[in-house]
Amino acid sequence: MATNDQLKQAIVDSVEHGAYPEPDVSSAELPSTLLPSLLADLQKARDEVKTDIRSLSKDIAPDVDGWIAQAKKLQADIERSKATARDIVSQAEAGKALKEKTHDAGNKVRLLEKEVAFNESLATTLDLIRSSCRILDSADQAYNANDLRAALDSIKQCDRSMLSLSAAQDTRAVGLLQTRSSRFKATLLDKTTALAQSLIQCDIDARSVAIEHNVKDMSDVDLELVVEILTYLGGLDVYIRRLKRDIEFSLIDPRLSTKPGQYTIYQVEDRIIRASKTASKPDTIATLDDIWSALDFLSTRLPKSVCEPLSQKLLPSLFETLTYTWLDQTVPVQIDQMPVFQHILDRVSKLAEQIDALDWASTALLKDWVQGAPRTWLSKRRETALGAARSLLFSGLRDRKTVERVETQTVSKGDAIMGGNDVDDADDAWAADWEEDTSEPKAVSTEQPATTTNDDDDDDASAWDMDDNDTNGASGTSAPAADGEEDDAADAWGWGDDETATEEAPKPASPKKTTKSHGPPATEQSTPSGDRELTLRETYTVTAVPDGILEIVMKVVSDAETLTDPSYSGSPIGPAASALYTLPTFVLAIYRATASTAYSKLDTGNMLIYNDASRLADQIRTFVARQAEKDASSTLPSHLRPSSRLRLDNDIKALETFAKRAYSAEMESQRTIIRDMLDGAQGFSNCNAEPFASACDSAVSITEGRLRDVHKQWAPILSRSALLQSSGSLLSTAISKMVMEIEEIQDIGEEESVKLRKLCDKISEVKDLFMQEHPEGGEASDMTGIYCPNWFKFQYLGELLESSLADIKYLWTEGELRLEFDADEVTDLIEALFSDSDYRRKAIADIRRS
C-alpha cells in the first residue's frame, strides 16, 4: 500500500512532468487529511519553477532587445511595400481605361469594314441578279424566236450565274429569280418534249413508228439538240419511259401477238417502220428477223444518247415477251422436229450477237434461253406426258374392255387336276380326298382361289389366287393386302411403301372337296418328262387407262433411246436424254396420285383401280423385260442402254401396293357395312320373341341381299376367281359374326334354336353365287366351301342347333365336327342348348376326353 509521501510525490510529478504514477499508487485512495500538505508541496514546486525562469531570463536579456529592433525595422519595410502597391494599382486602373477606349475604337473600325464589304457584296449581288434577269430575258427572246440552241445556252449561263447567288438564295429577289428560271425550264421542257414526240412519232392505231431528224419550220432544231435539252433539263428518263411504252404498243405487241386474225409483219420504208397485217401466222424465224429489223431501225435512226437508255428499258420486256409467246412455244415435243428447233436456236444466238454488236443492254436472257434449251425441252416433255396422263385418267374411264389373263404352270401326274378325263374318276378322286382327313391337299393350279384360314385379310390378298414369288406365271398380278386404313393420298405417291409391309398373296392350295373343273378354263400340253403344262385363262374388265399409260411410258423411253443414238450427239436436247428416263416414274406417280379422285365417281372405283393398277404393273414389268432382251443385241455402251437406265422396279411395286390397298379399302368398307347390318339383330338374343324376331329377320335378310348386290356389282369387273374370292370373303365376315354371336348366347331354347337354324339357312342361300359349271356339261359344283373358309363350320352350327346330344357326340367322335370346332366351343353350345342333366354332363366329359 502506498504511503502519503508516495501519493504526494506522484501527484506533484504528474503536474510538473506529466508522469503517470505506478499502478499501486494510482489505485490508492487519497485521504482528505492529505490535501493541505499536498497543496503546500504544489505551491513549493511552483515557486521553484518561477525562480528557475527568472534565473534564465537574466542570461538572455541582450538577445531579446535585438529581436525587438529587428521587428520594428520589418514593420517599416511593410509600410513602404504597401505604399508601392497602392501606386501600382492606381497606374493599372489608368491603363484599363485606355484599353477600353482602344477596344471601342477597334469595334468601330470593324463595323465600318463590314459595312463596306456588305455594300460591295450587295452591289455584286445586284449586278448578278440584273445579269441573270438579262440572261433570262435573252432566253425568252431565243425561245420565242424558236432558237432553242441559244435558249439552252442562255439557261446554262443563267444557272451558272445563279449558282453564284447561293449565299443570297433565301432572299426574296433571288427566290423570284429562281421561280422565273424554273418556269422557263418547265416551258422549255414541255416544248422540247413535244418536239421529240414530233420527231419520233409512235402511232398506236396505225401500228407504226416514224423518225425524223429535223423539225419542220425549225431547221436549226434537230433530234440531237432535242435530246441534249431533255438531258440537261432532266426530262430524258421520263421521255424514254414513255417512248418505250409507245414502241411496245405500236410495234412490239402487235408483232408478237399470237392471237388468230392479229398476225403482223414489219415493213420498213426509209424513216418509217410499221406492223402490217398478214393472213397467215409468221414462223419463228421470220419473227426473229423482224425483231432485228426493228432494233436495227431504231439503232441507225436514233442518237446513241437515246438508244442506250431506251435499250435498257425496252430489251428486258421484249425478250421476256418473245420468250414466252414465241420461243417457248416453238420447243417441240416430237424429236423429228429437232432440225427446225436447231435452226431457231441458231437464229436466236445470232440475234444476241447482233444486239451485242450495237453495245446495247445485255442479251443474257436470250443466251440463257439458248443454253437452257435441253432443260426447257425436258420440262415441256414432262408437262406434256403428265398432262396426257391426267387427261387419260379422267377420259379413259369411260372406255372399258375385257382382257384375258393367261397363266401357265407345269403340273405333275400326281396332282389331282391330272386325273382321268372321266368325270366319275374325278369324283372318285374327290371322295378319296374327302375321306382322308389327314391327307395334305394338292395344288390344282395357282388360279384356284382357295384359302384354309379364317383371316379375312388373307382372303383379300389372294384375289388373283397366285403367289407373288411364283415365277411361272406369265402375266399374273399380285393380290392386295388388307390395309384399308392407309391414307389414299399418301398411298398414291407410294410414300412409306418401304416401311409398311404389305401382306403377300398366299399360295393357294386346292380344296379338299373339289373336282378337276373347279378352276378357270384350262388347256393342257404334255412335256417330255411326262408332266403337263396347264394354261389357265381368265377374263376381267379394265379401262383404257393402263394401255394409255403404257403407251406414254413407251413413247418416253423411245424418245430417250433415240437421243442416245450417235446421230443425235450434236442435238441441242441431247443432254436431256438421261433425265428423260425419269419421266416414267413421274407418269406412274401422277396416276397413283389422281386415281383415287378420278375413280371415286364410279360405284366400282376401287375394284377398277385394282384391275387397272395390277394390269399396268404387269404391262410395265413385261415392257422392262422385253427392253432388256432388246438391249442385249444393242451396239450402245451398256451404261447408255435404256434397260440400264430405267429404274421402274420400285414403281412396279408401288403400283402393286396401290392396287392391293384399293382392293383392301373396298373390302374393308363392305365388311363394315355387313357388320353394321348384322348389328341390327342385337346379338340374336330372344330371336323368337317380338320385336327381336323381326329385327333378326330384317338384319339377316338385308345382309343376304347386300351380299348378292355386291356380287352382282362386281361380276362385270372382276375375274371369276377374284369375284368368288371377294364374295367368299364377305360371306365369311357375315357368318363369322353370326357364329360368334350365337356362341355367346348363354341359353338357347328349343324355339330359339329352330329360329336360329332358319336364320342360318337364310344366309346359306347365297351359296348359289358360288356354283361352278362343269366345262364338259356335268353337274355344277358348289364352291362355297372353297372360297369361304368357315363355311363348313357355319353349316355344322346349323346342324348342331337342331341335333340331339347323341348326334352331337357322334359328330364329334365319329364325324368331322372336331375339324371345325374345338372342344370348348362344342361344350359351350351343349350347355346353351340342353338343360343340366347326367346325360349332358357325360356327353361333355366324353367330348373333353376325346
Image: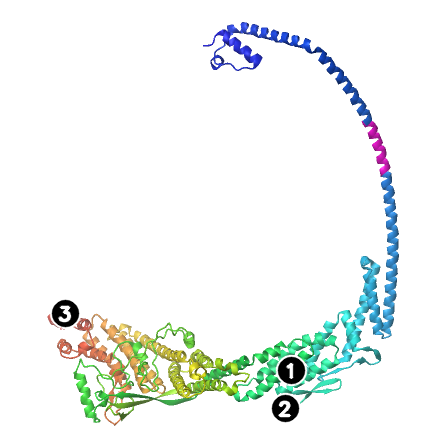
Marks 2 and 1, the one that precedes in the sequence: 2
Numbered badge on residue 351: 1
Amino acid, disc 3? Asp
Q: How many angstroms separate mark 2 from mark 1 (CA)? A: 24 Å
Asked whether residue 340 is drawn in magenta, I would say no
Q: Secondary structure at mark 2?
A: loop
Q: Secondary structure at mark 3?
A: loop
* 180 shown above or below 512: above
The span picked out in magenta is 85-99
Residue under pointer 3 = 836
x then y, percent, for residue 577: 49, 82
Query: Would you identify the image quadrant in which residue 320 lies?
Result: bottom right
Front-most of residues 115 and 634:
634
* 134 shown above or below 25: below
Residue under pointer 2 = 280
Does the residue at mark 3 contact the one at mark 2 (Cβ under 8 Å)?
A: no
Q: Secondary structure at mark 1?
A: helix
Marks 1 and 3, the one that precedes in the sequence: 1
What residue sits 80% from the left and 25% below the top? 82
Secondary structure of the magenta portion, mostly? helix
* Front tag of 1 and 3: 1
Marks 3 and 2, the one that precedes in the sequence: 2
Amino acid, disc 1? Leu
- How many numbered marks have been drawn onto this rendered protein structure? 3
x then y, percent, for residue 182: 80, 66
**Quadrant, the C terminus:** bottom left
Query: Would you identify the image quadrant in which residue 447 lies?
Result: bottom left
